[in-house]
Amino acid sequence: STPIRIGIAGYGNLGRGVEAALAKNPDMTLVGIFSRRPPESLAALDPAAPVFAMDALGERTGDIDVLMLCGGSKSDLPEQGPALAARFNTVDSFDTHARIPEYFDAVDAPARAGGKTALISAGWDPGMFSINRAYGEALLPDGATYTFWGRGLSQGHSDAIRRVPGVAAGVQYTIPSQEAIDRVRSGERPELSTRDKHTRECFVVLEPGADADEVRAAIVGMPNYFADYDTTVEFISDEALRRDHDAMPHGGFVIRSGNTTDAQAQVIEYRLALESNPEFTASVLVAYARAVHRLNQQGRTGAVTVLDVPPGLLSPKTPAQLRAELL
Ligand code: NDP
């Protein structure tokens, strides 16, 4: 059968991850990478990969089956999502949790009008973690759901550190509390505060002449980002930062702890341990591209989320193969 034709819109960490993931999925082919930056300024992983200006997408509606939207959630996707879903089947990783309902509506109307299918908010959280929260709640209605993140590099918190006066560079890791995880796994269903669940670890390179104590105080007291957590700040050299902290690991756990009768506790756990957050997120997006292509062929148009997609549609195997091999 003919391969699914994929376009990549936006070429940052996630865009590169999609390019890499396509190499592991022989039923798909890369039609082009589209960027707002000049094509000649981009170094694709595969030097032979076709790179185009974003404007060139206008002429490509007929030869892209699914367009992967790899822009940032903060300002790129709110614009690009609705505009591109009018003309292409799309998959994106919009991850501003509180704004997902309004983003869904903004993408749904143009996708419906254009007869396209737009899968929003794929990835791991939102994404695979959302699916596991849904399973947990449905299977164990008398229970509690716990999400722990990390150990992982938080892009948002790292950016916040870099804005503190006196900071030249820095990264932030979110660390789940082992004690809290152990209590949840035991079936105890504890009430956990924000501070109980995670700690934050910062590695900071100071600007010359900056006062370390002032910088530390500014970081640990920062509202919304650090004030509600136990935060440690370690000062390191620029060389150590580049040597030890240039990867983007992440992951975490979704645990549902519930009771079927008072005496019987049941615990479900889903765990991700990721050496590269963007490469894993991209792998999820690519599997959902296959599902989106099929949903569109079946006539399911408009916006959808991972909660609307049957798992078999993610697989390159036929339903008969899946029944024989995986049930
Ligand atoms: P990046 O900042 O690397 O890329 C975002 C966009 O910025 C790109 O599409 C690109 O657009 C532009 N860009 C990239 N590099 C440069 C550069 N050097 N100079 C100028 N512009 C650049 O973000 P990520 O790829 O790391 O993440 C994208 C989004 O993925 C995040 O905002 C996050 O919301 C989401 N995400 C979701 C997850 C989930 O589990 N659901 C997990 C991880 C991430 P262009 O090529 O057009 O210039």
Image: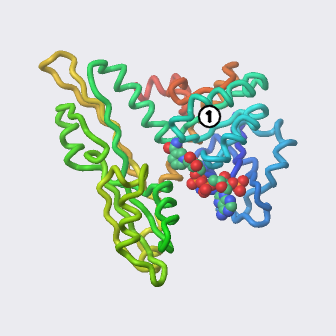
- Image-quadrant location for residue 50: bottom right
Would residue 143 appear left or right of 119 to someone viewing this image? left
Would residue 45 appear left or right of 276 to someone viewing this image? right
Can you say which quadrant of the picture contains the N terminus? Answer: top right
Q: Nearer the viewer, residue 126 or 170?
A: 170
Who's the residue at 41% across and 29% down the image? 326
Can you say which quadrant of the picture contains the C terminus? Answer: top left
Whether residue 11 is visible to the viewer of this picture, yes or no, is: no
- Image-quadrant location for residue 185: top left
Residue 252 location in percent, x, y?
A: 36, 46
Q: Please identify the residue farthest to the left as the structure is shown.
A: 263
Instruction: Say whether mark 1 is within 8 Å of ligand 1.
Output: no
- Image height of 219 relative to 212, above or below: above
Which colour scheme appears in the figure? Answer: rainbow
Q: Please identify the residue farthest to the top as the structure is shown.
A: 261
Who's the residue at 81% across and 45% down the image? 57
Residue 22 location in percent, x, y?
A: 62, 48
Residue 277 location in percent, x, y?
A: 48, 52
Who's the residue at 49% across and 59% down the image? 160
Whether residue 125 is visible to the viewer of this picture, yes or no, is: yes
Helix, strand, or loop for circle 1? helix
**Residue carrying label 1:** 290
Would residue 137 appear left or right of 130 to someone viewing this image? left
- Image height of 109 relative to 162, above or below: above
Q: Amino acid at mark 1?
A: Arg
Q: Nearer the viewer, residue 264 or 170?
A: 170
Q: Please identify the residue farthest to the bottom as the structure is shown.
A: 209
Residue 35 location in percent, x, y?
A: 75, 54
Packing grade of label 1 (10 A; few <14, some 14-19, many >=20) is many
- Image height of 308 relative to 94, above or below: above
- Image-quadrant location for residue 204: bottom left
